[in-house]
């Protein structure tokens, strides 16, 4: 599947919920969902038929778009979740949440996951003291993520940290704002992830 390069606000409108793809803009009245809460396109305001399959597909697309993954990447992560013992849906959420780009976003070093992915790709972060520029890198409990010394004046990182008060830091992470450093304290629970997605419907879709 080709990478989506169109307006990301259309994705939020298509799914009918805020996916927080544009950072702080999503918290203002300029958010596309606030202005036009119906799907994009000329038939967006018409009646929508919702079958069991389409409902499952929408949940999968919603989750995939929140984390900014292509279908092949998402399917690979789902395969890993299936191989874990326990509830597949919960393992899927934990694997997605423990990606380095998501942790960078959750710690407040970026205002969106898309921006976090770009910052990681450009090599602005260290994991346990080593440069890591792979957004899909899986962080573990005890890992320390920090901004490289020469990257601490990057405008996007500074601006995002200044706005972190309004967003908050999840309980499974710890941020040292002055040191531009964060640590993974625990594996996130389903309640701590708290996304507007029914992950069980994603499992049912891939189980067809």
Image (cartoon, rainbow, N blue to C red):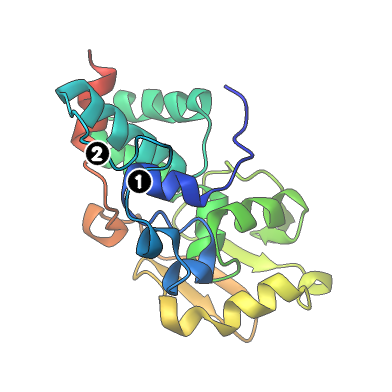
Q: What element carries label 2?
A: helix
Q: Which of 20 and 170 is in front in this view?
A: 20
Label ID, residue 162: none
Where residue 104 sits, quadrant-wise, is bottom right
Crowding around mark 2 (Cα neighbors within 10 Å: few <14, some 14 to 19, many 20+) is many
Q: Residue at position x 59%, y 52% from top?
A: 114
C-alpha span from label 2 to label 1: 11 Å
Q: Residue at position x 69%, y 52% from top?
A: 118
Quarter containing the C terminus: top left
Residue 155: image x %, image y %? 75, 75
Q: Can residue 85 be seen in this view?
A: no
User: On the image, numbered disc 1 is attached to which residue?
Assistant: 94
Mark 2 vs 1: CB contact within 8 A: no
Quarter containing the N terminus: top right
Crowding around mark 1 (Cα neighbors within 10 Å: few <14, some 14 to 19, many 20+) is some
User: On the image, numbered disc 2 is attached to which residue?
Assistant: 199
């Amino acid at each position: 599947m080709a990478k989506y390069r169109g307006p990301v606000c259309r994705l939020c409108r298509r799914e009918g919920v805020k996916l927080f793809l544009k950072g702080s803009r999503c918290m203002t009245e300029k958010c596309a969902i606030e202005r036009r809460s119906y799907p994009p396109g000329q038939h967006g305001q018409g009646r929508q038929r919702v079958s069991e399959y389409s409902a499952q597909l929408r949940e999968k697309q919603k989750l995939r778009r929140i984390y900014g993954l292509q279908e092949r990447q998402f399917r690979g992560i789902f395969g890993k979740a299936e191989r874990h013992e326990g509830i597949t849906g919960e393992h899927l959420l934990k694997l997605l949440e423990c990606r380095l780009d998501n942790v960078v976003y959750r710690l407040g070093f970026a205002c969106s996951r898309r921006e976090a992915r770009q910052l990681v790709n450009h090599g602005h972060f260290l994991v346990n003291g080593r440069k890591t520029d792979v957004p899909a890198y899986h962080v573990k409990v005890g890992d320390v993520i920090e901004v490289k010394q020469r990257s601490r004046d990057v405008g996007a990182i500074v601006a995002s940290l200044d706005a972190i008060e309004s967003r908050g830091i999840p309980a499974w992470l710890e941020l040292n704002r002055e040191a531009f450093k964060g640590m993974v304290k625990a594996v996130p629970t389903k309640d701590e992830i708290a996304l507007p997605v029914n992950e069980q419907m994603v499992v049912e879709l891939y189980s067809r």
